[in-house]
Image: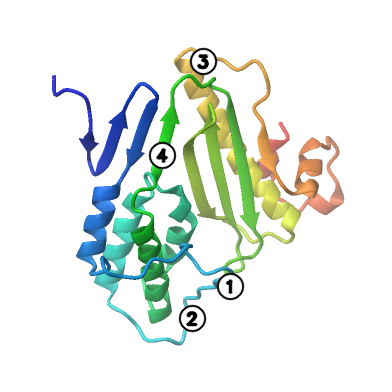
């Protein structure tokens, strides 16, 4: 009744015979203007390589209200910008007591968005709906509690449909354990997506691949024997093996 959808809750949707494009150019420009970052100098990455933020930073405190408002705006921007997902989740951990170093990291994300306002998601037509996922993790990346951060991306028909970045609930004692936990979490999401697709009569007879770059984690998931070296991994993460 309202015609073809072109703008909805900050999302700009462009539909054509070739596919659908979803972006947030207008929202990002308004966000930059709101926080007086519209004239900032663009940078090529949302976060400095090897950046380690800590809640025990010695720099000065900053206004919590402004900091939380900036984080909230960025959290909505990741609806179409998976490239800033990890950086936003990193700076979002310090909303209780933000420091100057944390604010500078947030402003770098804004500067990255300044130069990439046109970025978005593209879903071409005619693709086969095959499902696959990628998973990765940093080991003991958080300098405060030494927990690892898992990341995963999920593709349907070659198009990115879901992504995540989350700190793990327990400290991993090895890179293999951290990768194994990340893969198990990814596996639960893949099974949920498979069941959801089957509800709309899209069935998968072949195994759904999950790509992991750690050979030890892959070996643990394939080995039917419980080794003594992996007993310290919580039982629930052996869900991946099944």
Element at label 4 = strand
Dot 3 and dot 2 residues touching (CB under 8 Å):
no
Give the x, y percent position of residue 64.
29, 73
Tell me: residue 192, above or below residue 25.
above
Q: Residues within 10 Å of mark 1 (few under 14, many from 20)?
A: few
Residue at the disc numbered 1: 143
- Labels 1, 3: front one: 3
Q: CA distance from mark 3 to mark 4?
A: 23 Å
> Which residue is painted at 70% across and 40% down in the image?
238
The image quadrant that residue 97 belongs to is: bottom left
Measured Cα–Cα span from mark 4 to mark 1: 33 Å
Query: Which residue in the protein does label 3 denote?
Result: 202
At horizontal 30% and vertical 64% (from top left) the residue drawn is: 70
- Structural distance between the alpha carbons of marks 4 and 2: 37 Å
Circle 2 SS class: loop
- The picture quadrant where one finds residue 236 is top right
Between 20 and 155, which is closer to the camera in this rendering? Answer: 20
Q: Earlier in the sequence, mark 3 or mark 2?
A: 2
Q: Is residue 144 above or below residue 80?
A: below
Q: Which mark is residue 189?
A: none
Residue 188 location, x and y as percent?
A: 58, 36
**Residue for badge 4:** 121
Quadrant containing the C terminus is top right
């Amino acid at each position: 009744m309202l015609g073809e959808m072109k703008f909805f809750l900050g999302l700009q949707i462009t539909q054509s015979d070739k596919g659908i494009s979803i972006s947030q150019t207008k929202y990002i420009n308004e966000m930059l203007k709101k926080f007086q970052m519209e004239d900032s100098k663009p940078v090529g990455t949302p976060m400095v390589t090897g950046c380690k933020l800590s809640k025990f930073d010695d720099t000065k405190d900053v206004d919590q209200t402004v900091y939380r408002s900036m984080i909230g705006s960025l959290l909505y921007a990741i609806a179409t910008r998976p490239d800033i997902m990890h950086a936003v989740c990193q700076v979002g951990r310090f909303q209780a007591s933000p420091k100057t170093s944390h604010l500078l990291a947030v402003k770098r994300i804004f500067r990255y968005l300044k130069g990439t306002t046109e970025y978005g998601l593209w879903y071409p037509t005619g693709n086969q709906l095959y499902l696959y996922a990628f998973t990765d993790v940093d080991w003991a990346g958080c300098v405060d509690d030494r927990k690892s951060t898992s990341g995963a991306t999920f593709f349907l028909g070659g198009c990115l449909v879901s992504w995540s970045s989350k700190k793990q609930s327990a400290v991993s004692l090895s890179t293999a354990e951290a990768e194994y936990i990340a893969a198990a979490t990814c596996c639960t999401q893949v099974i949920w997506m498979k069941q959801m697709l089957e509800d709309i009569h899209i069935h998968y007879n072949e195994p759904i691949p999950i790509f992991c770059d750690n050979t030890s984690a892959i070996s643990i998931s394939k080995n039917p024997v419980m080794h003594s070296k992996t007993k310290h991994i919580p039982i629930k993460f052996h869900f991946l093996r099944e």
